[in-house]
Image: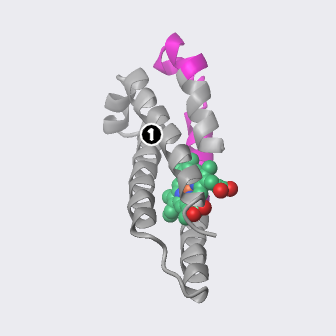
Amino acid sequence: MILVGGLFFMRTVLAPAGADACYAGRRAVWAKWAGIATAVLLATGFYNFFLIHNLAKAGGDELPSTYHMLFGIKFLLALLVMFLVAILAGKTTAAERFRGQMPRWLNIAWLASIVIIVLAAVLRTLHS
Ligand code: HEM
């Protein structure tokens, strides 16, 4: 919610006013929260995955291969979103270069986020 909501607000409300408007001089604050959200997503995401995997196994079932494929795509897209959010909030020269094309990267991150949420909804239907 924090990552995707932050992305949406930045892309829709702030970015049209220019890259500097996105952080209003408080980039480090967003970078900290984005880092926390990323760590929590990775921890809870893996926990969720292994829990669902083990529950299916305990019930004498395996998760279908479609589940693994869609989970893999969701995971890779999540890494992309996490990378883009981090680099756009970074303080290196590479980060500056990314911020030079803020609307483009925000659009990509936003699109990937929508696909992630749709995939999550589909994944939920693939096990009991
Ligand atoms: C931008 C990053 C991410 C977003 C926006 C996101 C979003 C979501 C949402 C909305 C759900 C549905 C929750 C529910 O059913 O109540 C979900 C489920 C899940 N997510 Fe993520 N997620 C992200 C990253 C990750 C990562 C990095 C992992 C793995 C390390 C992960 C693993 C999972 C798993 C295993 C489920 C359960 C799917 C199922 O019901 O079978 N997610 N995610």
- Residue under the point 44% across and 39% down: 112
> What secondary structure predominates along the stretch shown in magenta?
helix
Query: Residue at horizontal 40%, vertical 32%?
Result: 108
Task: Say above or below: 96 vs 2.
Answer: above
Question: Disc 1 residue type?
Answer: Ala
Question: Image quadrant of residue 99?
Answer: top left
- What residue lies at 45% left-to-right and 29% top-to-bottom? 106
Q: Look at the image and give the residue range highlighted in magenta.
A: 12-41
Residue at x 60%, y 76% (from the top left corner): 51
Q: Quadrant of residue 4?
A: top right
The residue to which callout 1 is attached is 112
Is the CB–ligand 1 distance for label 1 below 8 Å?
Answer: yes
Q: Secondary structure at mark 1?
A: helix
- Is the residue 64 above or below the residue 25 in the image? below
Q: Quadrant of the C terminus?
A: bottom right
Does the magenta segment cover residue 107? no
